[in-house]
Image (cartoon, rainbow, N blue to C red):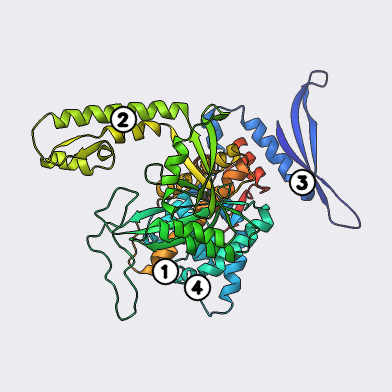
Amino acid sequence: MFVRETTSKRKGGPDVTYLHLAHNAWDSEQKMTRTKILHSFGRKDQLDIEAIRRLIKSLSSYLPTKEQLSLLPKDFKFFWSRSFAHLYLLDHLWRKLSLDEFFLSELKRRSFEVPIERAIFAMVAQRAIAPSSKLSLCQDWIKNAVYFPEIDELEVQHLYRGMDFLFEHLEALETNLYNQLVDLLSLDVSVIFYDTTSIYFEIEEEDEDEEEEETSGFRKRGHSKDHRNDLPQVIVGMAINRNGYPIRHWVFPGNTTDVTTVARVVKDLGALRPRQFVFVGDRGMVSKRNIDFLESRRLKYILAVKGRSDPLASEAVSKKGRFIKVKESLWVKEKILEDEARKMRYILCYNPKGAKKDQEKRKRALSFIEEELSHSQGLTKSKAKLLTHRTYGRYLKLSKNGKIGLDKAKLRTEARLDGKYILSTNDFSLPPGEIAQGYKDLSKIETAFQSMKHVLDIRPVNHTKEQRIRAHVCICVLAYLLSTYAENTCLMSWKKIRSCLGGLHAGCISSPEATFIKTTEPNKEQRSILRKFSIKPPPEILKIL
């Protein structure tokens, strides 16, 4: 079997050559070999090249593996393979939220010769895909790990200029982004959750106060939510909606207490001009001054209160009444109490399983305390530590003669709070079950902080200037926004999306005809993910060099 060409001569024009698949067969009658045409491919200058490729590929699949390899060009070379799909997806989301348009519009007023918008995108994308330092981004990540021509010429100085530009436009960016989210995603901002976390720096000294500029240092020691009170820190606050989208974020000096941030946060949220919303905050946000401020703004709120120290909350716990079952893990009852001229609605929430856990935890703590107290007489250093301990100190008292012992009154108070937490609200319209469930959704912001710390690696922060620290936090928030957008669209975690798309690469190949950049064939799962974003799979050939 072979390929045969036949030429047809024409009087009024050029000769035409045809291509055939032929086979020589023995003619027993004529006692000679005759050529039979098995298939005609048509005119040589009008061949269906793709059909011929499919035929060769189909036939070669029947050959042994070694012989299949022998069909490849002898001078075929494979130079490198880099991740491509992550950046392909994130760039699509970046443009969908019009972040490119925002930065390019702002950049028109400045005469930058470097691609600042691409530099900011690269830092956000790297934080979402493979968190590392800015230096590593330029020297290793964009040169060896990923393929994205728009960012492959970036240098470290471009990234720092991008961070400074980002800092200068933070407020305008967040306002623009909020409007995009509300318009594009029809974002529900009827309930806004607010909480804070701390980000520590592995340095010994705090930032010094600058008297000449009348500003205090930024990296300060304070209450650390990472249990690193020995190190300077900053406080990061974030407001999110029910779907986990960040509405706005703040960075405060490290010695800022939660209770002092509420007025600033509410004013900034009001500047975004959402319709009436419910402000949901944790125990650290509660003070008479904050409640007065929220009500002066005619803003509805749901706040957790401290059952041990708030007199009205303590009264709400002690009042008798039946719990209403919302679900197995949530039972509620409510009391309306008056504080001066203000009526307050208190919702007492109870979790039966949580009560058992609290009882077991207290039992272990008491066992440890009794063991420690039995070792020696008098007030020792170890006993003094128990007295000041955050947990053990709840159950102890110091008598007039200097002895430490169990405080039975405190034990009874603790037992009454097993599995319970208390909410205060000025919303008298919603059922207590919905109020309680609204507060439980505050856990979503804790999930957001965990994602920023352990998936996007917001630490370590390798910057010393306040403006760079603020810009770094903003980059992490933008990375969290894009990953949340991806999660809500795909209904799977960002880690899972990142893992699935990790196998879709771009590779540099050299053949006798050309050197080119080719993508790997997307598998079924990769195609499914891209389809959910209405993104076409990347073209097979990205670039011919």
From the top left corner, tell me how far across and down residue 45 is, in percent.
78, 51
Q: Quadrant of residue 212?
A: bottom left
Residue 509 shows up from this direction: no
Q: Residue at x 18, y 42 (%)?
A: 385
Instruction: Judge whether residue 50 can be spotted in this image.
Output: yes
Q: Which mark is residue 47?
A: 3
Q: Which mark is residue 160?
A: 1
Residue lying at the far front in this picture: please name it.
340
Counting residues from the start of the chain, the first of labels 2 and 4 encountered is 4
Q: Do tag 1 and tag 3 residues touch (Cβ < 8 Å)? A: no
User: In the image shown, does 159 or 358 lie closer to the viewer?
Assistant: 358
Disc 2 crowd, CA 10 A, few/some/many (<14, 14-19, 20+):
some
Dot 4 corresponds to which residue? 114
Asked whether the residues under the numbered discs 4 and 3 touch, taking CB atoms below 8 Å apart as contact, a structural biologist would say no
Disc 2 target residue: 362
Distance, label 1 to label 3, CA atoms, is: 55 Å
What is the three-letter code of the residue carrying label 3?
Leu
Q: Nearer the viewer, mark 4 or mark 3?
A: 4
Tell me which numbered mark, 1 or 2, is placed earlier along the sequence: 1
